[in-house]
């Protein structure tokens, strides 16, 4: 259950992170689906994350595999990414992506939510608009 008693919200699991992303609603768009980030190589769920404008990349702390999130590879050179860090100083996160969907099922907006594995702090570290279609396939690229 999300702890909203302090200045920063904290959670314990994917359900808490998903609820936080749904509450965030980037640009006011309701989040229709939230997908947990899972390493495609080892199945790990702990990451170090680089995020910039319209792009993010996660690196599994278990096996070191790096993967772009959603369509980030297409915008990486312009993204000017920085390493994500929790206010507590932690840099290892559970990650999930919230997707705002258009009526036809295409993705309208994405939000990258992170839960610090050191203290549970929840945050949305970047979000961006998807200006093309078809884009429904992006929900599998968290």
Image (spheres, rainbow, N blue to C red):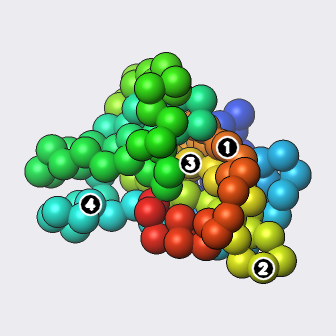
Give the residue number, with chain letter if any, for mark 3: 112
Q: Residue at x 52, y 24 (%)?
A: 78
Q: Nearer the viewer, mark 4 or mark 2?
A: 2
- Dot 1 falls on a residue whose secondary structure is strand
Q: Residue furthest front?
A: 133
Mark before the other along the chain sequence, 4 or 2: 4
Measured in 3D between alpha carbons, the distance from the residue under mark 1 to the one under mark 4, in whole angstroms, is 22 Å
Question: Can you give x and y, in whole percent of width and height, for residue 71 in the image?
Answer: 50, 51
Mark before the other along the chain sequence, 1 or 4: 4
Mark before the other along the chain sequence, 2 or 1: 2
Give the residue number, with chain letter if any, for mark 2: 104
Q: How many marks?
A: 4
Badge 3 density bin: few <14, some 14–19, many ≥20, Cα 10 Å: many
**Is there a contact, CB below 8 Å, between mark 4 and mark 3?**
no
* Along the line of sight, the residue nearer the viewer: 6 or 72: 72
Q: Nearer the viewer, mark 1 or mark 4?
A: 1
Give the residue number, with chain letter if any, for mark 1: 128
**Is there a contact, CB below 8 Å, between mark 2 and mark 1?**
no
Q: Nearer the viewer, mark 1 or mark 3?
A: 1
**Is there a contact, CB below 8 Å, between mark 1 and mark 3?**
no
**Is there a contact, CB below 8 Å, between mark 3 and mark 2?**
no
Figure quadrant of the C terminus: bottom left
Question: Can you give x and y, in whole percent of width and height, for residue 60 in the image?
Answer: 23, 48
Measured in 3D between alpha carbons, the distance from the residue under mark 4 to the one under mark 2, in whole angstroms, is 29 Å
Mark before the other along the chain sequence, 1 or 3: 3
In this view of the protein, can residue 1 be seen by the observer?
Answer: no
| Left or right placement of residue 72 versus residue 124 in this view | left
- Dot 4 falls on a residue whose secondary structure is loop
- Dot 3 falls on a residue whose secondary structure is strand
Measured in 3D between alpha carbons, the distance from the residue under mark 4 to the one under mark 3, in whole angstroms, is 15 Å
Place residue 128 in its image quadrant: top right
Give the residue number, with chain letter if any, for mark 4: 39
């Amino acid at each position: 259950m999300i702890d909203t008693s302090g200045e920063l919200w904290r959670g314990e699991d994917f359900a808490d992170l998903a609820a936080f992303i749904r509450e965030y609603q980037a640009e006011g768009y309701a989040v229709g689906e939230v997908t947990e980030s899972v390493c495609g190589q080892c199945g790990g769920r702990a990451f170090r994350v680089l995020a910039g404008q319209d792009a993010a990349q996660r690196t599994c702390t278990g096996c070191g595999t790096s993967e772009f999130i959603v369509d980030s590879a297409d915008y990486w050179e312009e993204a000017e990414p920085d390493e994500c860090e929790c206010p507590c100083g932690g840099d290892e996160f559970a990650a999930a992506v919230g997707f705002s969907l258009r009526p036809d099922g295409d993705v309208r907006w994405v939000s990258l939510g992170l839960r610090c594995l050191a203290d549970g702090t929840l945050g949305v570290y970047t979000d961006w608009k998807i200006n093309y279609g078809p884009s429904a396939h992006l929900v599998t690229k968290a």
